[in-house]
Image (cartoon, helix red, strand yellow):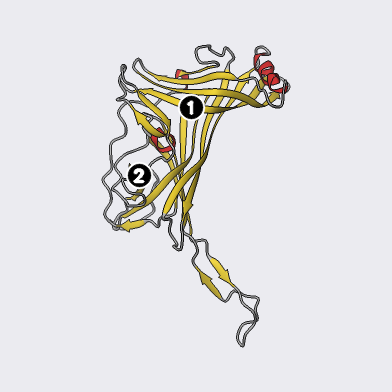
Amino acid sequence: MADTELVGGVDTYPLYKEETTYATAVAPDTHWGSETTIRVSKTRNLQMIHGVADGTDGGQQPRTTLAGLYASQISVQFSPISFAHLKHIMGAVSGTGSSGDPFIYTHATKPASLTIGHMINNGTTDSRRRHAGCIARTYTIRASEGQAPQCTLEYITGSSPSASTTLDSNASAPTGSEYNFDGGSLEAPDGSAITNVIDSVTVTISRDAKLYYGLSATAAAYTYGRTTYKIAVTYKYKTDAHWTNFLGQQTSLTTLATYASMALKFTNGASKYVDFVFTTVTADPHDDNDVLNEAFSEDVTYTAQGLSITERTS
């Protein structure tokens, strides 16, 4: 069969595997969930070298093109079935996922790197692309009215990809079904349900991932800097509760009104759930949305100082 145009997700598939040694590629063997998009952006950061005029060059056009630092950004969007992928951004996990010993994802200083594979199954010549040394930079999970939760993980790497015509074998998706929007709930503080109709909620975990190259075109090491947690919620207005909470931030420039905790929980059937519990949660900013003949709504973004996530899979 001749090589031809391909269809994403039919003739292609992405996989990942945690590395033992940074940027030493391993054979990827795991799906994130039900993936819908993988985007890989690569650059050589070319340098255009100019110089003063000589006998053949007028000094204005580039004289030489040199390669700079290799860098790649990889974004994977998927519907979650399990939440094992949270280890990529949080860094640490304990437990077995059972009722008495659920998985607990907590913040670690330096999450492990991954090899991400992008497999392209062509008619004659297949293409296996392994991207080693991938480190997670941003994670989002978003749920909205009538829409199942969607996750996006963004990674960076400074390691050049390895290529082959022998594909890594495809793997089965995580066991179980995808989560749906109707299993979601939001509490502030944890244990006290918010009674407003919630149009949408988006959680973003951002980590300041840094690559170090030295005198090389590819990255030799990495570290992490600051971590931030944000929860963006659109409510249908019901009372002044959220407005009053936001106004509490105005009492002092140094003393803020906070929720001790905020919990976003998704359930999936009788025995599966994931529970994001944020601590020391502050509202800022707050927007009122008042549109003719539309329900009055509020957009509130919260910033948290800590996060622990519990998952039960059985």
Point 44% across, 37% down: residue: 89
Figure check: 193 above or below 224:
above
Q: Is residue 312 visible?
A: yes
Distance from disc 1 to disc 2, alpha carbons, whole Å, reads 31 Å
Q: Name the residue under label 2.
A: 13
10 up-or-down from 2: above or below: above
Mark 1 residue element: strand
Task: State left or right for residue 79 relative to residue 293.
Answer: left
Question: Which sits earlier in the primary sequence, circle 1 or circle 2?
Answer: 2
In the image, which is nearer the foreground, mark 1 or mark 2? Answer: 1
Q: Which mark is residue 307?
A: 1
Q: How crowded is mark 2: few (under 14 residues within 10 Å), some or many (20 or more)?
A: many
- Judge from the rendering whether residue 223 lies leftward or rightward of residue 189; answer left or right: left
Where residue 80 sits, quadrant-wise, is top left
Which quadrant would the C terminus be assigned to in this image? top left
Amino acid type, label 2: Tyr
Please tell me which residue is depicted at 52% across the width and 64% down the height of the picture: 46
Q: At label 1, which amino acid type do we have?
A: Leu
Residue 44 at what x, y percent from top left? 48, 61
The extreme front residue here reads: 254
Q: What element carries label 2?
A: strand
Instruction: Answer whether labels 1 and 2 touch (C-beta < 8 Å).
Output: no
Measuring from the top left, give residue 278's x and y in whole percent. 51, 24
* Position in image of residue 306 (x %, y %): 51, 27
Q: Is residue 121 above or below residue 146?
A: below
Give the image quarter of residue 183.
top left
Residue depicted at 32% across the width and 49% down the height: 21
- Neighbours of disc 1 within 10 Å: few (<14), some (14-19), many (20+): many
- Quadrant of the image containing the N terminus: bottom left
